Amino acid sequence: MTPPQEPHPSHPYSPAPPFTGSGPWEAPAPQVRRPSEVTAAFWVWVSGSALFTLLAASTLTAFDEIVDTVATARPYPGVSEAELVPLVTTALIAALVLIVVFAGLAALFAYHARLGKPWARVALTVLACIALGCLLLAATLPALVIALIPLVGAGALHTTKAKAYFAAGRYR
């Protein structure tokens, strides 16, 4: 292995200029102040994520009651109670895991939306649509009220001021 070559004396070494985040061909990123709508949407999404997680945890306290209610209601006449209990238990655990994952993703995307990343606004809008669809399937009053949380959060991210903030975020 050869040692590194020293620069020729007629060509002295000059260090590279410091990295500024944009090349000479790009204009510097415009500085836009975060609108209050984006901050409000961030807190709506974070509080909604915490609320979803608390509701999932409260479901664990009534886990046996839910399983017994479904098992005694016998929604499927050809399925015995011994077969139905493991099925309901598995479905409840899967739903709880998905709720916690959903809440974590919502908080993560809300953080990135607060930073002005346009892809996070799209991701939160998709999560709001998924949440709305899932909660409307429940068709209970608490589920309908909870469905408003993601709608408010996504709606705040699509206001005029927020759109300008995210348009400027494309260059960050």
Image: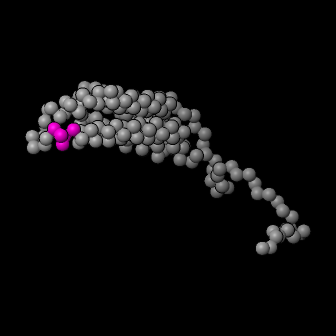
In the image, residue 146 sits, relative to residue 120, either above or below, namely: above
User: Where, by quadrant of the figure, is residue 79 drawn?
Assistant: top left
* Residue located 13% across and 37% down the image: 75
Q: Where is residue 33 shown, x and y percent of the image?
A: 57, 34
Q: Residue furthest right?
A: 9
| Foreground pick, 102 / 84 | 84
Counting from the top left corner in percent of width and height, residue 121 is at: 44, 41
Q: Residue 99: image x %, image y %?
A: 36, 37
Count the numbered circles shown. 0
* Residue 89 is inside the magenta segment: no
Q: Quadrant of residue 133?
A: top left
Q: Is residue 124 visible?
A: no
Residue farthest front in this picture: 82
Q: Would residue 47 be seen by someone viewing this image from the given angle?
A: yes
Magenta segment includes 83: yes
Q: At 87% from the left edge and 70% from the top edge, which residue is drawn?
A: 8
Between 158 and 74, the one lying in front of the other is 74
In the image, the segment drawn in magenta is: 81-85
Quarter occupied by residue 51: top left
Our reading of the magenta stretch's main secondary structure is helix
| Extreme-left residue of the structure | 77
Quadrant of the image for the N terminus?
A: bottom right
Question: Closest to the observer: 60 or 48?
Answer: 60
Residue 29 in the image, given as x and y percentages of width and height: 61, 45
Left or right placement of residue 59 versus residue 9 in this view: left
Judge from the rendering whether residue 23 lies leftward or rightward of residue 84; answer left or right: right
Report the residue at 14% width, 32% height from top: 73
